[in-house]
């Protein structure tokens, strides 16, 4: 079994920053892709960013230049640095990790951008 636990969410003012973390644990040989999705209230879950095991990253159009994804393979952890946050970034953020052709999900962490 593989478990993913997100952390780092919370309340932040517009223009502020947050760094999300997602640590994978369990019986893991090698994690392939990792990434983040988010789901705003009343909306579908949208892809935010992804990163390969080799460090190649990709971003959704709405977060390019604003968010940065990174990972620490030794710690089986993926990060999402979020800057210049806006109210429309308010959402539950979910991380995922792909291992042996299976995508595992975290339970999500809430990010609220409000003054």
Image (spheres, rainbow, N blue to C red):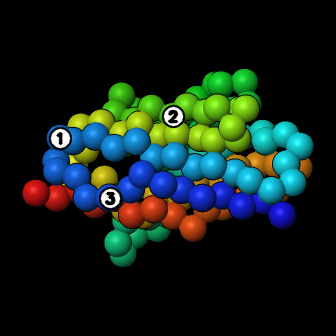
Query: Residue at position x 41%, y 37% from top?
Result: 81
* On-image quarter of the N terminus: bottom right
Residue 113 location in percent, x, y?
23, 56
Is residue 63 visible to us here? no
Is residue 97 visible to us here? yes
**Between disc 3 and disc 1, whose residue precedes?**
3
Circles 2 and 3: CB atoms closer than 8 Å: no
Residue that label 1 marks: 15
Q: Nearer the viewer, mark 3 or mark 1?
A: 3
Residue that label 3 marks: 10
Circles 1 and 2: CB atoms closer than 8 Å: no
Residue 2 location in percent, x, y?
78, 59
Query: Residue at position x 25%, y 58% from top?
Result: 11
**Cα–Cα span, label 1 and label 2:** 19 Å
**Cα–Cα span, label 3 and label 1:** 14 Å
Q: Nearer the viewer, residue 104 or 28?
A: 28
Residue that label 2 marks: 69
Q: Is residue 5 above or below residue 80?
A: below
Task: For mark 2, give the secondary structure.
Answer: strand
Q: Is residue 76 above or below residue 52?
A: below
Could you classify mark 1 by the number of other residues whose Cα lies within 10 Å: few (under 14), some (14-19), or many (20 or more)? Answer: some
Could you classify mark 3 by the number of other residues whose Cα lies within 10 Å: few (under 14), some (14-19), or many (20 or more)? Answer: few
């Amino acid at each position: 079994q593989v478990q993913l636990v997100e952390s780092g969410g919370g309340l932040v003012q517009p223009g502020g920053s947050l760094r999300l973390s997602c640590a994978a644990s369990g019986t893991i040989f090698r994690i392939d892709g990792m990434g983040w999705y988010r789901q705003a209230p009343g909306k579908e879950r949208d892809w935010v960013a992804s990163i390969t095991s080799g460090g190649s990253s990709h971003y959704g159009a709405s977060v390019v230049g604003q968010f940065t994804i990174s990972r620490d393979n030794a710690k089986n952890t993926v990060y999402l640095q979020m800057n210049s946050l806006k109210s429309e970034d308010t959402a539950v953020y979910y991380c995922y990790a792909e291992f042996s052709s299976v995508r595992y999900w975290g339970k999500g962490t809430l990010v609220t951008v409000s003054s």
